[in-house]
Image (spheres, rainbow, N blue to C red):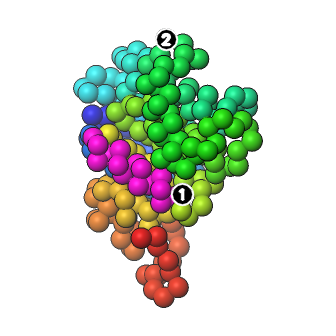
Amino acid sequence: MLEAAGLGVSAGGRELVRALDLSLAPGAFWSLLGRNGSGKTSLILALGGLRAPQSGTIALDGIALAAHRRGELARRIAVLLQDEEPDFWGSVLDYVMLGRYPRSRSAWSRDEEGAAAARHWLAELDLADRAAQGYRTLSGGERQRARIAQVLLQDADILLLDEPLQHLDLRHQVQVMRTLSGCASGGKTVLAALHEPGHAARHCGFAVLLYDAGRASLGRSSDMLTQANLEALYQCRLEAAGTGSFLPS
């Protein structure tokens, strides 16, 4: 279990998260919602051990995150960063196989089991026919799905994903959310920063809402994702969807 207690995170002199208590249990799918600049990325980086918080503690199975070796953390926690330069010159399969590195002897070792798992995730995300294609030649949405496949190949217990749905068309947004739901159903912990409350309500059992000035609220999605809460979160008026609103089944 990944737990934060009294967590405080700041960036650029702004307090983004203040005194947050959060427990991410196995099998739970959490959404992370908030306006641009509210601290979603900074929180994910802190929970993944990629940046130090300003206050509070983060523990993995009761042991401080900083006390774990980097290799162990990479086997336990996988992080999908929001941005990445497409400078990889190998094939799509080669790129996805980098997710195997925490469990391999070298970055370029390709065991049969790992290659089979990589092809599984490529097929799961509609990229099976792109395996031999150059990673740099993919579209933005295809690259995003390849990045997600790489994270899934890491086979970590905890998945922290910063905007996994960016660049994706509607079909693939739903496909990715269903894949992540399957990971949670299989016992993994999933936390995903999202911009679409509809996906969060449909697929995620729990939600963290990040407001301005470090304030946060969290709980079951059914309690958090109300019209009043979302209007306060995004600081705009909302109306219930009716005729002309389409949600994938």
Q: Which amino acid, mark 1? A: His
Per the image, label 2 sits on a secondary structure element best described as loop
Examine the image and state in which quarter residue 169 appears. Answer: bottom right
Q: Main secondary structure of the magenta part?
A: helix
Per the image, label 1 sits on a secondary structure element best described as helix
Which residue is found at the position 54% from the left and 53% from the top?
165
Which one is in front, 79 or 185? 185
Q: Position of residue 249 (x, y in %)?
A: 42, 70
Which residue is found at the position 58% from the left and 46% from the top?
127
Q: Is residue 163 left or right of residue 189?
A: right
> Magenta stretch?
172-187
Q: Is residue 204 magenta?
A: no
Mark 1–mark 2 Cα distance, whole angstroms, equals 33 Å
Q: Residue furthest bottom?
A: 243
Whether residue 69 is situated above or below residue 10 in the rendered picture? above
Which one is in front, 200 or 102? 102
Which residue is found at the position 36% from the left and 51% from the top?
181
Q: Which amino acid, mark 2? A: Arg
Residue 108 appears in the figure: yes
Rate crowding at label 2 as few (under 14), some (14 to 19) or many (20 or more) other CA atoms within 10 Å: few
Q: Position of residue 144 (x, y in %)?
A: 60, 46
Residue named by callout 2: 105
Which one is in front, 201 or 122? 122
Residue named by callout 1: 172
Which residue is found at the position 39% from the left and 31% from the top?
156
